[in-house]
Amino acid sequence: MPKIGVEQSLTDVQQALQQKGYDVVQLMNENDAKGCDCCVVTGIDNNVMGISNSVTAGSVIEASGLTADQICQQVESRINH
């Protein structure tokens, strides 16, 4: 199952992804992103904890302005392609 890192303030997104069966980890620091297939961040800081600096091999999704369902759709499209 894909491992998805989610910034800790995005609890609705964490719950939505867990309900879909994803392995969700909270991103509290840069090391938490290692090994994640995809990361979801608030986008308040475009380089949140250095995650966009290729710490993760997967995609980084900026959650600002998106609903939890929209974020889940983006995660699914990036993981499945």
Image (cartoon, helix red, strand yellow):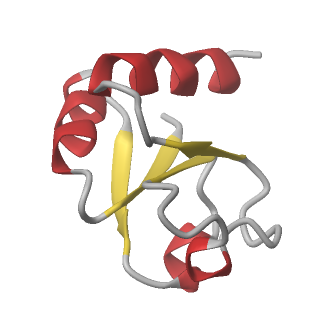
| 63 in relation to 66, above or below | below
The answer to whether residue 65 is above or below residue 58 is: above
Image x and y of residue 76, in percent: 54, 18
Residue 72 is drawn in which quadrant?
Answer: top left
Residue 65: horizontal and vertical position, in percent? 41, 33
Which of these two is toward me, 17 or 46? 46
Quadrant in which residue 55 is drawn: bottom right
- In the rendering, at what x and y percent does residue 8 appear? 27, 65
Q: Is 27 in front, or is 70?
A: 70
Q: What residue is at 40 percent from the left and 28 percent from the top? A: 66
Image quadrant where one finds the C terminus: top right
Asked if residue 75 lies left or right of residue 72, the reply is right
| Res 9 quadrant in image | bottom left
Please give the count of numbered marks on the rendered protein: 0
Name the spot of residue 44 as percent of width and height, x first.
47, 63
**Does 22 sit left or right of 48 as displayed?**
left
- In this rendering, the answer to whether 47 lies above or below 28 is above
Please name whichever residue, 34 or 13, is drawn nearer the observer in this view of the structure: 13
Residue plotted at (31% across, 24% down)? 67
- Residue at position x 57%, y 73% from top? 48
Q: Is residue 41 above or below residue 17?
A: below
Q: Residue at x 63, y 71 (%)?
A: 34
